[in-house]
Image (cartoon, rainbow, N blue to C red):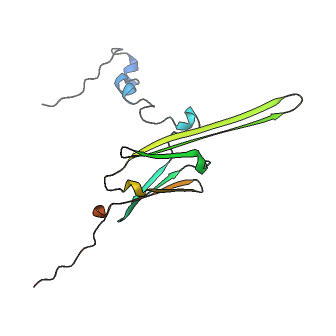
């Protein structure tokens, strides 16, 4: 004996049941399936893209944040988390005899990453170049990969 999901049909045997399945409709909402792009809401992604690479001696993190400058970033380490925050706003005004044109923009994001226990928190280095914020997180000595050692047989 097997259990089968019961499909409740609120409209009885109307012709609509062949075209409109209430359970399927509510299980497959567009906002659940991420079919509505971020550009629909505000034109900007809420989080910048992030690459993380682990090597034998460290972790390398690259965060894509074009259009910012070094002074726009605030990077902190708190309770084992690397917190990255950036905020930038610009405004421009042009006044003529018949009109005044004002334009402004605001862009901000926050990103937090839980640091592994193997990272030396006091040795984290960061740099910003060409729209990429890069981090180098050195590993503690005991966490570094030890190369294989050959054992001689007597």
Task: Work out whether 127 lies above or below 91.
Answer: below
- Measured as percent of width and height from the top left, residue 152 is found at 15, 82
Which image quarter holds the C terminus? bottom left
- Measured as percent of width and height from the top left, residue 99 is found at 84, 28
Residue occupying the point 29% across, 19% down: 8
Residue occupying the point 36% across, 28% down: 27
Q: Residue furthest bottom?
A: 154
- In the picture, measured across the screen, residue 14 lies left or right of residue 154, that is right
Residue occupying the point 28% across, 72% down: 147
Q: Quadrant of residue 79?
A: top left
- Measured as percent of width and height from the top left, residue 26 is found at 38, 25
Q: State whether residue 139 appears in this view.
A: yes
- Measured as percent of width and height from the top left, residue 25 is found at 39, 26
Q: Residue furthest front?
A: 122
Residue occupying the point 81% across, 30% down: 100
Nearer to me, 35 or 73: 73
Nearer to me, 15 or 141: 141
Which image quarter holds the N terminus? top left
Task: Work out whether 153 lies above or below 10.
Answer: below
């Amino acid at each position: 004996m097997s259990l089968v999901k019961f499909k409740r049909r609120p409209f009885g045997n109307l012709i609509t049941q062949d075209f409109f399945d209430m359970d399927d409709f509510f299980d497959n909402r567009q906002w659940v399936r991420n079919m509505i792009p971020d550009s629909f809401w505000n034109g900007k992604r809420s989080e910048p893209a992030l690459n993380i690479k682990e090597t034998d001696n460290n972790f390398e993190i690259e965060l894509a944040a074009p259009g910012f400058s070094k002074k726009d970033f605030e990077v902190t380490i708190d309770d084992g988390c690397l917190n990255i925050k950036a905020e930038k706003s610009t405004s421009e005004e042009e006044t003529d005899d018949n009109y005044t044109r004002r334009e402004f923009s605001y862009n901000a994001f926050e990103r937090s990453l839980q640091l592994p226990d193997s990272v030396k928190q006091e040795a984290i280095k960061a740099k910003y170049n060409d729209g990429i914020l890069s981090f180098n997180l050195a590993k503690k000595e005991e966490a570094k990969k030890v190369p294989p050692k050959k054992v001689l047989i007597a």
